[in-house]
Image (cartoon, helix red, strand yellow):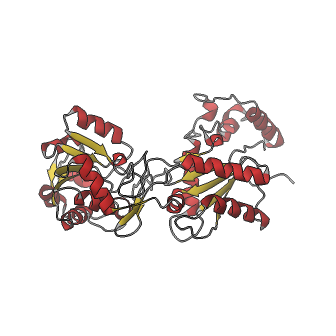
Amino acid sequence: MERVVGTVSRGLRAPIVKEGDDLQKIVVDTVINAEKSGEMKIRDKDVIAVTESILARSQANYATIDNIATDVRNKLGGGTIGVIFPILSRNRFAICLRGIARGAEKIILMLSYPADEVGNHLIDLDKLDAQGIDPYKDVLSQAEFEAKFGKSKHTFTGVDYVNYYKELIEAEGTKCDVVFSNDPRTVLKYADNVLTCDIHTRARTKRLLKEAGAAKVCGMDDIMTASVDGSGYNDKYGLLGSNKSTEETIKLFPIHCQEFVDSVQKKLNDITGKQVEVMVYGDGAFKDPVGKIWELADPVVSPGYTAGLEGKPNEVKLKYLADNEFKDLKGDELKKAISQYIENKEADLVGDMSSEGTTPRQLTDLIGSLCDLTSGSGDKGTPFVYIQGYFDNYTK
């Protein structure tokens, strides 16, 4: 019988992983046991993806609020610090903010508006229009913002992040003023030393601040890049990709990801003889159409992946072929023509009309998003995702 199933994404249940556990062995054993149970048959070009959180946990890659405070104080002087463009998140940023505040005497907290970088809204665009506010040039104090718009309320959680963040800072015995602006250089009116907390726009923000004469500029990716008093660290991303572990600690983005994925691939190949691709994944890269929140709060979707996951898809659009190239064909004749077209397609279809609409993003971004949606962020208990048929096409 002709094959009727294409790509399959399976969440694999695994033991609860704790600090110091041999995650490589756990991943390999889980995949092998899934095959033994009859759930699947391991094939070449399958993908096993491991969530970044569980890798970081096995590595014990944690830091405390005090560790963060020490690093902030050492790198930014411990006086008045401008903290700009943080995302609005209790899980992602609030604990970091406590450590940052503990390492300073005063914080100038500058928030982007109407939303943060990943789409968490402080205020609706329509309300800005009604008040005649131009977010590209207007700078507002907290008093001005709340006089025009009232207290902020997050779309989903109901949290007033403006006052929540200010209270967190002041609870550390640190003074705080809140400013609203989308120009990073605004903060230099209040502070010479700046910690920029944006994720994907951080390089530009740092450049603008340095060109404008800031004394010291750090990003979140510059804090906790080395161990502080025995803590965890991330030499490439610092605090980026971290999230809350306890009320006093954060879990950092994992380290040594490339070594991990390469080793897992080799172990699976030694046992099965199959070339399974391996990746570590975090947030998916997609946007919620209701809350307008872009999911990607990690610095990258995948911090480590095997060589077979390099690059972008090179696909043709079946709809285009059916409606244009072979619009006069039907049934088996149409199927044969499209199959031949696929088998003979160019190695690089960039700019070719037959690929229009295929959205050639990075493979790791696409697969990582699929994994994030498959595993979820709650109690499914499936920190590993096994994908089959992703690299197949209509001819397979």
Q: Is residue 263 visible to us here?
A: yes
Which residue sits at x=30%, y=62%? Answer: 66
Asked whether residue 6 appears in the rendered view, the answer is: no
Image coords of residue 215 (percent x, y): 19, 39
Res 147 quadrant in image: bottom left
- Decide which of 192, 78 is in the foreground and name it: 78
Image coordinates for residue 269, horizontal then vertical, percent: 74, 50
Depicted 305 relative to depicted 34: above or below? above
Quadrant assignment for the C terminus: top right
Which sits in the foreground, 60 or 318? 60
The number of numbered discs placed on residues in the rendered structure image is 0
Is residue 165 found left or right of 297 in the rendered image? Answer: left
198 relative to 349, above or below? below
In this view, 160 is above or below 394: below
Q: Position of residue 324 (x, y in %)?
A: 67, 33
Q: Quadrant of residue 307?
A: top right
